[in-house]
Structure formats: structure tokens, C-alpha cells
Amino acid sequence: MNIEAFFSDVQNELGAQAVDRGQDTCLRYGETTLPAFDRRPAGVLYPASADEVKAIVRAANRHEVPLWPISTGNNIGLGSRAPVREQQVVVDLGRRMNRILEVNQELGYAVVEPGVTFQALQDELARLGDKLMLSPTSGPPLGGVLGNALDKGGGYGPYFDHFGMLCGMEIVLGNGELIRTGDGSLEADTRINWHVSKYSFGPVLDGLFAQSNFGIVTRVAVWLMPRPPVIQTFHFSFAQDSDFAAIVDLIRPLKMSNFVPTLFRLCNDIYAIGSEVPSPDYAASGGKRAINTEARRALQARHGLGAWQLSGAFYGPSPQAVAPMIERVKAHFGQILGARYIAHDDALNMPPLRAGIDAMSGRTTQAELGLLQWRPGGGNSWFLPGTPMQGKTAAELDTLARGIYEKHGMDFMVMHVASARFARGLHVMVWNRNDADENRRADECYIELAREFAGRGVSVGRAPTDYQDLHMELLSPEFRQACEGIKKALDPKGIIAPGKYGIGA
Amino acid sequence: MQTHFTLKQLQDPRIAEADGIIQTCQHFGFCTATCPTYTLLGDENDAPRGRIDLTRAMLEQGGAPDAKTVGHIDRCLSCLACMTTCAVRVDYMHLVDRARVHIEKHFRRPLPDRLLRALLARVLPYPERFRAALLGARLARPFARLLPGRLSNLLAMGAAKPASAEHDIVTGIHLSQGPRRHRVALLAGCAQRVLAPQVNAATVRLLTRHGCDVVVARDTACCGALTLHMGREEEAQEAARRNVDAWMRQVEAGGLDAIIVNASGCGTAVKDYGHLLRYDPAYAARAARVAALALDISEFMMRVDPMPPAVPRRIAVAYHDACSLRNTQRVTTQPRHLLASAGFVVRDVPEAQFCCGSAGTYNLLQPDIAGQLGQRKAAHVESTQASVLAVGNVGCMVQIGRHTGLPVVHTVELLDWATGGPLPGALEGRALPELPPEQPAAAAAFW
């Protein structure tokens, strides 16, 4: 590795504005919220085009310098902007490759570069008349559309499957070659099906670039849904932790039939309320134990919520058209003793329910960021397994996770995002990273969760960078070897994010 | 963020407050992505997270800060977009003000800087002086290019024609046009009275038309924001005390339902009087009471059941969120609702989280960055293809107006026009096409 020659080459080809090796820059790009120490990069690069990305990758191949590409770097709790290994060179695609290249309102898609944020796309769609709506996450509005999709992030509406809604990519492979997937690879002046058909001739290579390190995706198209005239959310609170299995079983038919077009957000009390207030119990517990039942009950009462809160939405031409469907849902969940219906207009005035309303309305939201202040000290990671939509199984996994959190003195904070057959469980961990004991317990908690879930046949949908090796090790040797083989084929010198997702370490 | 203040330092309540604020920062970095100067300059220390770190080091060390630190803090707009995205709600607003006060007290700026800042502090808050200065600047404009950097920029302000004193708002009580339902005070302001006196006139007409007696207290002063943001805390406090005295006399005399502010930068300052004067035992409680009465004009109008438009005009109006309304006061829906209720078709401006570069005296002290931001904002405004831009803050009106050919008006001017007032001056002679009636949603698409 010749890092000086690498930076010199890049600066000569891209100009000084594309290179930053400042100490302050490297220090801050190396910060994470995870239990392990921060990992400083050797420098940060800011390419402005796919050609410049190609130049960087080719220089990295020449000098055998490992790169760490990021889109907007808002992956807080999963690694932020920091590389998985010290001294990798961050390629920040967010600063200068942030153009919306096309919005096709007729066919419903947008073509974006890696730096396009949910907010920027939302603004552009609004400017064009608000005819299309994006599928935002409930995370930071300035998170990246492309990065979130490639990391298998999700939304809450009918277009919730963000990776599934990508169609047509442009990628700079680890070997420095630029390819386009689907009809994008035709040698033609126009490629009219590139962003509308995923199944053109040949293998579907797109999937190789989700949670991998085989190349740097420099543009994608994302499909967008027409904005409905009326969006009415509906909400329920349920009194008991033990209501969970019944709720899951009642959600399943509504999604199997697609009667409800959105996913369901099923938040426990701490997840919903934690976005609004810090833990009232932390001062007393000193972070040594999980929040107690009395404090939870008091929080629920203060915010007019229960042990679980459920949110979904209907889309339609008018409130009158939607009203009967909401009535059916009310009756459906009313089967659970103690279920309390919360109407859309009432929920608008309940801050813990705001993030769901915004996200299901295709609007970005700041409402959930407050979760990170539940405990002081800035520690945050996300454990993201899932469960089949069967109440008994889901409840067993829920009980397992709750017990592990409690054992390590962490506060159990979870939202299950439920579709027809599967629910992803967003298990949030917030702790005081400045407290060595608490930091150690957070780390041990995550590892135990990962191992115990894997032992029951459950891996994760996404993972913090600190634990990607662990999750990969839990998969079969044959699968790992296959990943390594692809890595060698597309990135023979292993320069794209070696170690990311446990590949090419 | 961990701090290392000494116990002696922490005995100063101002340092203790700063310490508490700094400790809340957890370096998540949500703020960087939304910070205009970080976006433009790409320097970690030109983002809130970096500035908090620099402020910590500066206050811990005490004494004169280095020029690099001062430069990074000077480049902060105080737009406070960072506070809207901060997960742990760091009170950056008060921290950066504390940093500025420290710099003002301990850092000796180069002479031209000192002169410029002194000039701004002694002229802008005083309408008569400002009016005279603008007239002088107009006369001197031909010589602008002979002057260095920011001084020539200052003269460029001479492009703004100052209103003559006869257009200034009349102090005293403006009586309700019908039965009185409310008694309110209006902050007459300072720079706005010279640059855009029509805003106060439209506000008075709008309020009196809606059953308000409007008190414009003779002895009110500048709100103090201009001097506070230059680190001149004591001058800002003195201005605040004058205003508190003036309004409390009105509270005690006839009662006030609200203190109306129509320049949102001032609104943020007045709403924060309780904090500004918290260590002044003679004023703390009264200042807090005044702050609690302060409302942006759009907040107040939402409470008074605004009358329907005399003649609905479906004109496309782009609405620009002034940072002080959007990020600090969190007033975003009210102006849009009022404009839509008045018949206008409201269009959002993309990248609303971005400051236009006005930021009090920022466009005079940091003209290069302000110019870039102004151009960027104007391009977004024009991309909406609206006929008019509505704004709730005079600083933004002037700043965006310098970069766009679109007519720029205050929100109240449109509300006044819609409910029987005159056509806003900026719209005279302009083409104002009306949009066709909105199609029923169900017919517009599949839905």
C-alpha cells in the first residue's frame, strides 16, 4: 500500500477540492455511536461523478489502498460515517454526487445519485406538484435514498421495500470497470426499459450490490407511488406486554389480503415515548438495570398510551371512502381486551405517534430522532432481526430479547414493522457510552442477542459495522466462501470496503 | 461531549449553562448535514458539532481565543437548522451566543472589523440613523468599487431605497375598525421601519380590521437581536429592558392579549427575553411575562378567526420559511394556512431548511457566503414558478430580493390585500396570473 502516492494521484486527477486529509475531518469521520473505539480514516475523498469514482477506484487498485464509500453518512447506530477498519479512505459520495438526474412522473420513478437525500427528493417531488410520493424511513430526513436501499432499509407504505423498488443501477466495480444493470448495459442511444424492467436478459446482478462490497453504486432509479388524495392513519394502544401475540395474529390477515396497504408499526411503550422524553428512571438506576415496571406504567399513563401501540393507514379518494375500512379495522383489533382506538385527528396531537403518521404519509420526519436521548452518553446501536408473522413464535422471540436486555441492564425498546409473512424487529439500544461498564454491557447485550437469535434460526436484516463479522461468521462456510469468491472476481485486490458485511476481511 | 471546566469557572452561571449545553452534545452529527456553512465549505469546524467543540476549548481556556476559532464561529449564521435535527436537543442557540459574547470581550479584531461592527451596532438599531446612513450610501454608491471588500458591500445596501420618515408607523393606539375584541402591542422594529415600512402599515390594517386595538408604544427600541448576535450582550439587554418597561406599562394600563412581532428575527429575540434577562432580578420575571405574550403575526391571526378573502385570487405564492420562524419558533403551518385560506395557492420552496443568508448582519459581515446562499435560495424560489414570494421576515425579504426578479412581499401584505387592503407595492405593474380552479382529486388521477 502506498497511501501518499494514492492521494497524490487522486489530487492530480480530481483536484484539491476532492481530497481532505485534515485531522479534524478524519477525527469526525471516524466517530460512531457503537461500543468499540472510533476508527479514523486516512482521509476523505469527494468525487463529483461516476468517472471520478472510477478514477479513485483505479488509483486505489494501483496503490492497493482500501476505500470506504458512504452516501450521506447518516447511518447513526449502524456505524455512521466511520470505516469498518482504521485507515480506510472514506469516499463521501454525498457532498458532490447529489443530483436528481430525472423524475419521470408518468412512469413514477426518479433517477438519483448517491448523495440525494429523502428530503431533497421530497422537495423536488413537491416542486413538481406533489403528484408522486417517496417512501421515507422514520430516520433522519437527510439520510440517503440510495444508501438506505442498498443497506436494505425500509419504509412503511406500499413501496416500503426500498431495495425492491430500485430498478436499474450504474456501478463502478472493485476492478475499476463501470457497468450498468438490465437494459442499461445495451449499447444504444436510449434505454427506455432500464428503469422500468428488472428482468431483462441475463442474470439479475443488482442483488449483488445490496449489503456487499463488490462495487460502488453511482446511480439508481427508485420507483415512486402516486400520492393519494386522502391518507388516513389509524392507531391502537394495547395495555399489556402479553397482548403481543394476539396483535401479530390479527395483523397477518390484514396484510395477507392486502386489505391494509401500509405496513404496521407496532411499537412498545419505550420506543414510542422515548422519542419524546429521556428515561425518568435513569437517574435512580444509574444505568445499572432496566427501567422498572412502575416507571413504565407511569410513562404510559402520562402519554395516554399502552404497552404496545399499533399504527397503519388507508389511502383513498376521500375520507368517506376510507371511513368504512377504518371501521372494519377498529372492529378487528377490538377483539383484544383493552384495545383503545386512536383516530387520525387525535393522533396528530400525540407526538409519540407522529413519526408513523409522517412516514405513512410519504413525508420525512424528525419525530423519532429523540429516541437517542433516552439515556445520556450517546451510545446507540440497532439489533434488527425479524420474526414470522405467527403470534406464538413472535412472542417467544420477544420474550427472549426482553430477557437479554434486562439481564444486561438495558431498556427494552422495540418496534416491529409488520408485513404479511414477516416483521422486522427494530431493537434499539441506547446507553451511556462514557460509562465503561454500561458500554461493555451494551456490547455484550448485542452479542448475546445475535447469538441467541441465530441459534433459533434468525439472522438480522441489517447490522452495525462492529458486528458484521460476527453475523457473517454465524452463516455457513459455503455461503461465506461464495461471497469471497464473488469478491475476488469483481474486486480482486479487495479495495472496496474490505471487512464490510464480513466480506473480504 | 465531556468538559473540563474548573470549579471556579463553573461558579459563573453563564459558564455553568454553557457547560451543561456542551455536555448534551453526543456528536451524532445530524446537525452537519443540515448546516448551510458545512454544506458550502465542507469544513467540520464550520458545522455545529465542530463549533461546539471549539467553543468548549475556548471557554475552558478562557481569555483571548485564536483567530481560527473566531473565524469558524463568525461564519455561523445562527439559522439554527441544526436544532431541528439534533436528536438530543442541544441548545446551540444560547451556546453560540455565549461564544460570541466571549469573543467580543476577549478578542481584538483587526481595526476595519471593529469599525464595521461598531458602525452596524450604532446605526442599524436606530431608524433615524439608519435612514440617514442609507441615504448617504445611495449618494456614495458610485464610489463603492473604490472601497475595500465589505465596505463596498455595505454601500451596495444603498440600492435599497429608504422610506421617508413620513411613511413610518405612527406611535400610539390604532383603534379597531369594529367592536374591539383584542388589545395587542406591535413591535415597530428598527431596520424594517426604514427598509419596508409597508409591513407595519399592512399589519396595523389587518389587525384593526380583525377587531384589535393596536398599541405601538412610543418608547420601544430595537429588539436587541442585532447587537446580541454580534456578542454585544449588554447592549441587547439594555434594549430588552426598554421594551419590557414599555410593554409592561401597557399591560398594567389596559392589558395586552399579545405582543405582535412581524419581523421573525425580532420575534425570536423577544420570545427569549426571559433568558436574556434571567440574571437581572429587577427584570427577570417581567421579561419572562413579556416573552410569554410575544407572538408572530401569523400565530396571532390563527387565533382570531381570519375573515374570508374579499375577492379570492388563485395566485401562485411561494412561501419562504425564515429560519427564525421555522427553526426557532417552529411556526411553519400557520402562514401557509392563512395564505391558503386567503385564496392563494401556496407553494413550498425546496430545501426549506437552508438559510437565505440574511441572518441579521451576516450578509454584511460575511458577504461571500451570504451571496452564495442568497443565489441558491433564489434559484429554489424561482423553481416553484410562483408569481410572488411571501416571507415573514424583513431580512429575508431584502436578501432574497437582491437575488431574484420575483416580487417579494411580507405575508401580512398579502393577507391585508386579500381582506380589503391595497395591492402590495411590490406587486404593482406585475403580471399576477390566476391559476384555474383545482380539479376534484378523484378526477385528477386514478384515485
Image (cartoon, coloured by chain):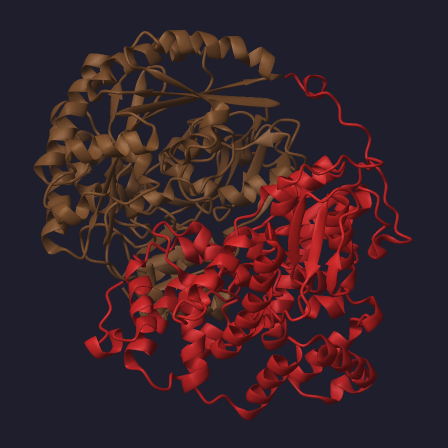
Residue closest to the far front: B253
Number of numbered markers:
0
Percent across and percent down for residue B380 are 66, 51
Please indicate, yes or no, whether residue A404 appears anywhere in the rendered image.
Answer: yes
Please indicate, yes or no, whether residue A158 appears anywhere in the rendered image.
Answer: no
Which quadrant holds residue B242? bottom right
Percent across and percent down for residue B400 are 70, 60
Percent across and percent down for residue A349 are 46, 32
Which quadrant holds residue A483? top left
From what the image shows, is residue A431 above or below residue B31? Answer: above
Percent across and percent down for residue A304 are 34, 28
Assign the C terminus of chain B to one quadrant of the image.
top right
From what the image shows, is residue B176 above or below residue B287? Answer: above
> Viewed as shown, does residue A161 lie left or right of B294?
left
From what the image shows, is residue A365 above or below residue B121? Answer: above
From what the image shows, is residue B87 above or below residue A135? Answer: below
Q: Colour of chain A?
A: brown
> Viewed as shown, does residue A152 lie left or right of A119?
left
> Viewed as shown, does residue A24 lie left or right of B80?
left
Assign the N terminus of chain B to one quadrant of the image.
bottom left
Q: Colour of chain B?
A: red
* Closer to us: A58 or A471: A471
* Closer to us: B248 or B379: B248
Residue closest to the far right: B429
Residue closest to the far bottom: B111
> Viewed as shown, does residue A306 lie left or right of B257?
left
* Closer to us: B85 or A384: B85
